[in-house]
Image (cartoon, rainbow, N blue to C red):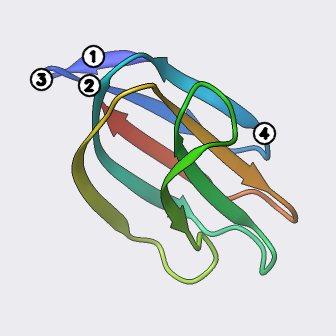
Amino acid sequence: AKVVNGYTFHHSASNTTTTIKSGAGVLKRVTVNTLGSASNTCTIYDNTAGSGTIIAVIDPTQAQRTFEYDLVFSTGLTIVTATGTAADLTVVYQ
């Protein structure tokens, strides 16, 4: 992860569960850079595991686009991508 203008980013291009940050923070945006296959899913949690409070469920198969959030999470930031060919995603957070 790199810090740019106070924000850090995480790049994901595989199906996995990744805890991006432990503890409180801010989810700024998620960008779908390259689409996943028709069955690909992406769920973002306020947790340090791939369960619990869901922040968002993104469909990474429809369009290359940016989802703006600017919201606070308290426990952690975990992203779960699954099934089919994974989308290429960039998550920006503090």
* Label 3, residues with CA under 10 Å away: few <14, some 14-19, many ≥20: few
Q: Which marked residue is nearer to the observer: mark 2 or mark 3?
A: 2
Q: Residue at x 78, y 81 (%)?
A: 38
Amino acid residing under circle 3: Asn
Q: Which residue is mark 1?
A: 3
Amino acid residing under circle 2: Gln
**Quadrant housing the C terminus:** top left
Q: Which residue is mark 2?
A: 94
Q: Which mark is residue 5?
A: 3
**Quadrant housing the N terminus:** top left
Task: Looking at the image, tell me whether mark 2 or mark 3 is earlier in sequence order.
Answer: 3
In front here: 46 or 88?
A: 46
Q: Which marked residue is nearer to the observer: mark 2 or mark 1?
A: 2
Q: Which residue is mark 4?
A: 16
Amino acid residing under circle 4: Thr
Q: Quadrant of residue 5?
A: top left
Q: Which marked residue is nearer to the observer: mark 4 or mark 1?
A: 4
Task: Say what secondary structure mark 3 lies in.
Answer: loop
Q: Which mark is residue 59?
A: none
